[in-house]
Image (tube, rainbow, N blue to C red):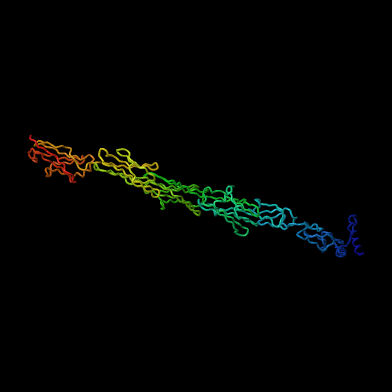
């Protein structure tokens, strides 16, 4: 013990004397390793050649006093170990000296889908201390990329909410479209009904009524979906959609990639019925509209009563709005049909229009020229096709409505038959033009024919003839002005008391006049005071007409 004290004093003196200018010249070989030679009584420890005790908050190490690590303490000196805190408590720094330094703490956790924590994950902080979670890209908490909250063993997870619409966001009008809200989170979402998983369009809520389909399910670890189905989308359904989801009692909406755009491809076709007359030109136009120019190929097709039409079709090939025009020119009776337009988008779908009916208004059979025997009855018939025809007749006697005898409608096309009955016709009253006038949907079509009334036979305009023997007389037969055609009279024969007369006969077909020059002088009529008769008879078997020829003396 004396040696230890002496050496200690000498060492101290050597250190202190330097400051007073005293130079102790020790041979290096004679240097003393004081620490290796110092022996300290327990619980002291040799430090820098001195024996020292380890204070509270430290424990005895092999060569020095060591601070108690976090979570432990020593409240007395010269302890060989530190006492651990218990009951979920911990000290907040090294070198704690009392059990009161052990307080309730929270170990900073690692939040799911976070990119980092502050303080660092694993750090103990006092319960209630705020920590900050930094979310990965496109992940959020309460709509923010960071979240500061009191430390807990179950921190808020970062979440990503996205809305998708089908595969491409493009749909044809009338399609059923699924809006899918996908939630990726370490927390537990509650997506069991519309109140927990909802959609907005252009910022306005989508009504969840009208039989909309809804479902929710888990697709993979930490991934959840809820699906809303829109039935029969129209052009008004197009727009920007976003979804919100309830996650661990908080509502999360998508950020950065918040929305999905629903593009509805539409086909516009005026299906109003077209009614027009034969010979005109009409055009049927079908318009396809897309929100943006698509790389998808767009083609048009037309059908007439279910049969493909290729003639007369011209279609646009560029632009977001494209027309296809079917031209019917000139309009024919066979064009009466139902027409439909199709627009096909490759890889997307086919749009089919409703049917459009085209009706040609016409008179089935033109009104012919007619001839009638005086005193008989005749019926003029007008058969028409259309949709809502009215029929009148224009006659020499004035306007006449005729009589509707039949009416039928097939596939929207009306067939109407109207008859005009003329009784006891006479040339003076009934000869002339008869016109059937058909009016339908403001369109007028007509057909005309002439009626000629004649006497069934012929008559002479001459009375009995008195001629002088040796003179020439002319016997003339005049057919009625509006009689039958001339061929009926080509075989007229003249007779004298039953004997045919062949010489001197002339025909004037164009004038419908037939005459014979008859010479009394030639002795064909005997000199007699009694009358003789010349008969005229047609080969059609008409009754003969007798003309009395009287002979007188010169």
73 with respect to 452 (left or right): right
Q: Is residue 295 left or right of residue 393?
A: right
Quarter that holds the C terminus: top left
Residue 14: horizontal and vertical position, in percent?
89, 59
Q: Is residue 234 above or below residue 53?
A: above
Above or below 328: residue 1 = below
Quarter of the image where one finds residue 91: bottom right
What is the number of callouts on the image?
Answer: 0
Q: Identify which residue is drawn at 78% across, 61% down.
A: 84
Residue 526 seen in render: yes
Residue 500 or residue 544, whichever sits in front:
544
Q: Is residue 133 left or right of residue 290?
A: right
Res. 38 in view? no
**Could you tell me residue 283's position as x and y percent?**
42, 45
Work out which residue is located at the far right of the displayed protein and give it. Answer: 2
Which residue is outermost to the top? 554
The quadrant of the image that shows the N terminus is: bottom right
């Amino acid at each position: 013990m004396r040696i230890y004290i002496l050496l200690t004093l000498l060492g101290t003196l050597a250190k202190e004397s330097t400051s007073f200018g005293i130079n102790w010249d020790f041979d290096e070989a004679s240097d003393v390793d004081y620490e290796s030679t110092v022996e300290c009584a327990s619980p002291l420890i040799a430090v820098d050649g001195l024996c020292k005790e380890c204070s509270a908050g430290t424990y005895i190490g092999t060569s020095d006093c060591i601070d108690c690590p976090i979570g432990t303490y020593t409240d007395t000196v010269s302890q060989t170990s530190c006492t651990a805190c218990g009951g979920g408590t911990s000290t907040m720094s090294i070198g704690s000296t009392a059990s009161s330094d052990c307080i309730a703490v929270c170990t900073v956790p690692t939040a799911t889908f976070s990119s980092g924590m502050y303080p660092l994950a694993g750090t103990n902080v006092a319960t209630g201390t705020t920590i900050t979670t930094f979310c990965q890209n496109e992940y959020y908490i309460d709509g923010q990329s960071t979240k500061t909250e009191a430390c807990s063993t179950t921190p808020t997870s970062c979440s990503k909410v996205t809305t998708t619409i089908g595969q491409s966001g493009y749909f044809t009008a009338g399609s059923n479209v699924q809006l899918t809200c996908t939630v990726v989170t370490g927390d537990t979402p509650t997506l069991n009904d519309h109140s927990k998983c909802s959609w907005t369009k252009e910022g306005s809520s989508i009504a969840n009524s009208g039989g909309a389909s809804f479902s929710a399910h888990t697709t993979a670890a930490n991934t959840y979906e809820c699906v809303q189905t829109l039935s029969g989308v129209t052009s008004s359904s197009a727009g920007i959609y976003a979804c919100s989801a309830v996650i661990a009692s908080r509502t999360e909406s998508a950020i950065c990639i918040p929305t999905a755009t629903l593009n509805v491809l539409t086909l516009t076709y005026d299906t109003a019925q077209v009614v027009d007359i034969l010979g005109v030109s009409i055009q049927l136009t079908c318009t396809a509209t897309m929100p943006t120019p698509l790389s998808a190929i767009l083609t048009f097709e037309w059908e007439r009563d279910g049969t493909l039409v290729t003639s007369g079709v011209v279609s646009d090939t560029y632009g977001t709005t494209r027309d296809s025009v079917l031209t019917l020119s000139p309009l024919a009776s066979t064009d009466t049909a139902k027409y439909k337009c199709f627009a096909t988008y490759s890889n997307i779908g086919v749009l089919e229009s409703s049917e459009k009916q085209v009706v040609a208004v016409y008179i089935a059979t033109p009104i012919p020229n007619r001839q009638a025997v005086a005193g008989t009855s005749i019926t003029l018939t007008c058969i028409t096709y259309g949709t809502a025809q009215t029929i009148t007749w224009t006659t020499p006697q004035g306007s006449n409505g005729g009589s509707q005898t039949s009416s039928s409608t097939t596939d929207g096309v009306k067939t109407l038959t109207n008859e005009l009955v003329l009784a006891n016709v006479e040339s003076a009253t009934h000869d002339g033009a008869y016109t059937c006038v058909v009016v339908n949907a403001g369109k007028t079509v007509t057909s005309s024919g002439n009626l000629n009334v004649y006497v069934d036979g012929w008559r002479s305009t001459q009375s009995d003839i008195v001629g002088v023997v040796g003179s020439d007389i002319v016997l003339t037969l005049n057919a009625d002005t509006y009689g039958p055609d001339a061929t009926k009279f080509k075989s007229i024969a003249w007779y004298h008391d039953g004997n045919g007369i062949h010489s001197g006969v002339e025909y004037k077909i164009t004038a419908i006049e037939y005459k014979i020059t008859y010479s009394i002088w030639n002795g064909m009529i005997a000199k007699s005071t009694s009358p003789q008769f010349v008969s005229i008879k047609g080969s059609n078997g008409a009754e003969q007409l007798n003309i009395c020829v009287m002979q007188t003396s010169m």
